[in-house]
Image: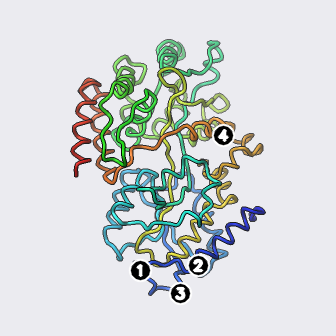
């Protein structure tokens, strides 16, 4: 691995200008007094095992600033719970750098758990434009984008080719093919992540956004979900379960369960993140070589994906904030970002990598993914995001389970979100 020309020089300069970036809340009593020293990086469970080798590269070249990796559960909800419990400990927190879900930035910033970062000290202009918004709160940068993501529609190329139909661009086409083609091949029609957890919040938001609606506005202070678009989006998913082209088993699916169903050859269509494309295309998958990916459908054409991924933030009480900033610069540099994709199958934030012919040959979905990311929208921003997400999960799952009509679910969602926003 080597620094790449100008980008490399820029990151080396960045490492210099960040020297001495210590705030009054930092603990400088451990290690050097210049804000440098060992770090602890907390992250959700690394399903592909790519991160430890990247940090080994840092540790070899920064022997006095070694990073200890702490892997929390791979469930977003459990990781959130453990991180927030630790951060509430103030200067007793164990974590210096936090690899946080993009939608926790607002919550963590509003709570004072992560420190603001100067925009001009990070190469934000080299990132895909929409991802930077996920790292801001109230107009200020509180984190640096590390990994991005957007939902894609995976499909069985072999099955659609036999039927002579293109991959669906609209909900009507998806519904038709899931109803009529899938059963002919002994397949279930369509699935996403419909267990009541963070993944359901994402799937619900994508359905609402694709229909032209929103959930919250003005940094979470205004509730906008009570709309015809929200009823249409949630109604589309609920109808799928009711009519059977979304199997009821999908109400128990998270990312891994839904990915496994697709790569085992049990689904015609799957909404998932790009890593599922890589896994389903790999040797040993029952559908290897037969997987295609297109943007998510919407009512009248391509729909709207929700931005996923993670941001790197510095704990307000970080022991060595200068080292923390330098580590973030390292992890968001182009050469490491390339390995985030090639080793971890995770979408990088560096825009130039999406135009690399070698990477496109290896990851054919990259052009589709770039389009999805550029046109994606963030989940609703709120300083109470964890509560917002829990409400969305519960209400939408009731609608998908048939316990409540989509119209009643939207009205209930508006009431409960209004209660949260007024706090």
Give the Cα distance between marks 1 and 2. 15 Å
Disc 4 target residue = 366
Residue at image coords 34%, 62%: 84
Residue 336's spot in the image, x, y percent?
66, 60
Q: Is residue 72 left or right of residue 419?
A: right
Disc 2 target residue = 19
Q: Nearer the viewer, mark 4 or mark 2?
A: 2
Give the Cα distance between marks 3 and 4. 43 Å
Q: Is residue 86 left or right of residue 142?
A: left
Check if mark 2's residue and mark 3's residue have beta carbons within 8 Å: no
Mark 1 closeness class: few <14, some 14–19, many ≥20 residues within 10 Å: few
Disc 1 target residue = 24
Give the Cα distance between marks 1 and 3. 15 Å
Check if mark 1's residue and mark 4's residue have beta carbons within 8 Å: no
Q: Is residue 147 above or below residue 18?
A: above
Q: Is residue 384 above or below residue 20?
A: above
Residue at image coords 36%, 76%: 91
Label placed on residue 32: 3
Check if mark 1's residue and mark 3's residue have beta carbons within 8 Å: no
Q: Secondary structure at mark 1?
A: loop
Quarter of the image containing the N terminus?
A: bottom right
Q: Is residue 306 above or below residue 133?
A: above
Residue 277's spot in the image, x, y percent?
59, 37
């Amino acid at each position: 691995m080597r620094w790449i020309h100008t980008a490399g020089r820029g990151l080396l300069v960045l490492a210099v200008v960040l020297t001495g970036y210590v705030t009054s809340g930092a603990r400088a009593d451990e290690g050097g007094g210049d804000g440098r020293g060992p770090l602890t990086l907390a992250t959700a469970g690394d399903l592909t095992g790519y991160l430890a080798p990247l940090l080994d590269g840092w540790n070899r070249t920064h022997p006095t600033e070694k990073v200890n990796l702490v892997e929390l559960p791979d469930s977003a909800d459990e990781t959130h719970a453990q991180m927030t419990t630790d951060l509430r400990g103030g200067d007793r927190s164990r974590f210096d750098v936090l690899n946080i879900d993009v939608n926790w930035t607002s919550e963590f910033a509003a709570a004072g758990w992560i420190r603001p970062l100067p925009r001009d000290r990070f190469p934000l202009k080299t990132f895909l434009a929409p991802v930077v918004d996920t790292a801001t709160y109230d107009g200020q940068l509180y984190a640096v984008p590390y990994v991005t993501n957007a939902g894609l529609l995976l499909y069985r190329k072999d099955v659609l080719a036999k039927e002579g139909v293109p991959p669906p661009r609209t909900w009507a086409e998806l519904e038709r093919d899931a109803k009529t083609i899938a059963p002919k091949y002994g397949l279930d029609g369509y699935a996403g992540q419909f267990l009541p957890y963070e993944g359901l919040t994402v799937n619900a938001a994508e359905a609402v956004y694709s229909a032209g609606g929103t959930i919250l506005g003005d940094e979470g202070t205004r509730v906008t979900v009570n709309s015809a678009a929200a009823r249409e989006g949630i109604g589309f998913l609920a109808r799928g379960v009711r009519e059977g082209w979304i199997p009821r088993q999908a109400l128990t699916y998270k990312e891994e369960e839904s990915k496994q169903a697709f790569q085992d050859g049990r689904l015609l269509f799957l909404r998932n993140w790009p890593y599922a494309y890589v896994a389903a295309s790999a040797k040993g998958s029952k559908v290897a070589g037969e997987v295609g990916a297109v943007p998510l459908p919407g009512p009248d054409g391509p729909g709207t994906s929700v931005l996923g991924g993670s941001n790197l933030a510095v704990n307000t009480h970080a022991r060595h904030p200068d080292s923390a900033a330098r580590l973030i610069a390292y992890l968001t540099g182009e050469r490491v970002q390339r390995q985030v994709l090639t080793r971890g199958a995770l979408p990088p934030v560096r825009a130039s990598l999406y135009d690399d012919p070698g990477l496109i040959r290896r990851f054919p979905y990259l052009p589709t993914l770039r389009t999805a990311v550029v046109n994606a929208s963030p989940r609703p921003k709120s300083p109470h995001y964890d509560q917002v997400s829990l409400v969305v999960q519960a209400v939408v799952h009731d609608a998908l389970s048939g316990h409540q009509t989509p119209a009643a679910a939207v009205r209930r969602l508006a009431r409960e979100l209004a209660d949260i926003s007024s706090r």
